[in-house]
Image (cartoon, coloured by chain):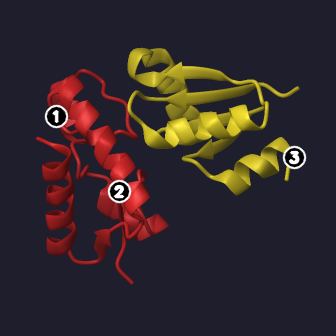
Amino acid sequence: MVDIIVYTAPNCPWCDRVKEFLAGKKAKFKEINVAENEKAAKEMMQKSGQMGVPVTDIGGKIVVGFNESQLKKLLKIK
Amino acid sequence: MSEEELRNKAKEYAEKEPGLKLNPNDNIVNAIVMGLARNQEKYGAAYCPCRPVTGNKEEDKKIICPCIYNKDEIEKDGHCHCRLFVKEE
């Protein structure tokens, strides 16, 4: 199973959508609140080239925002 | 600022600025406005809910909605990162 990290911020509705989507697909993921973790915020910036959330890291492949088709593609699900 | 006031502020901005409009999807607007209201309550300013608040007041000024990134993002992607504003076709 590929490692999944979701970088989030509090009160972010698209972060909730990503988490709901992954949970609905029974995909295990680690959530990191970048508003409370400066190191992770820098890590997210390095990975995605921007500071908006959510950012989803699926085995090193990055999805910025809630992009269902991209998430499905990387998770290899329909 | 209440959700209604935040919604009106966003609407006024969208009407004033050329090349963009408020997202016609009310569900998206409502979700973002709710996030703005929660940030207003938590941090004292309507920071974009789709960007982390750093605690550095000067830095965080950049992400008070409408954030400084919105026009570039709308030009490039057709919408700002949180999708509150979209390109006016």
Residue that badge 1 annotates? B45
Residue that badge 3 annotates? A76
In the picture, measured across the screen, residue A32 lies left or right of residue B89, that is right
Picture quadrant where residue B57 is located: top left
Q: Secondary structure at mark 3?
A: loop
Q: Residue at x 52, y 37 (%)?
A: A15
In the picture, measured across the screen, residue B36 lies left or right of residue A39, that is left
Residue that badge 2 annotates? B29
Amino acid at dot 1: Ala
Q: How far across and how far down the image is residue B74, in percent?
A: 38, 66
Can you tell which of label 1 and label 2 is closer to the viewer? 2
CA gap, disc 1 and disc 3: 40 Å
Amino acid at dot 2: Val
Task: Please report, as a chain letter, where disc 1 is located.
Answer: B
Q: How busy is the neighbourhood of tag 2: few (under 14 within 10 Å), some, or many (20 plus)?
A: some
Task: Please report, as a chain letter, where disc 2 is located.
Answer: B
Which residue is the extreme one toward the bottom? B89
| Same-chain status of marks 2 and 3 | no
Q: Locate the N terminus of chain A by quadrant.
A: top right
In the picture, measured across the screen, residue B73 lies left or right of residue B12, that is right
- Picture disc at residue B16: none
CA gap, disc 2 and disc 3: 31 Å
Q: How far across and how far down the image is residue B18, in percent?
A: 22, 77
Q: How far across and how far down the image is residue A38, in percent?
A: 42, 17
Q: Residue at x 40, y 16 (%)?
A: A36
| Chain in red in the render | B
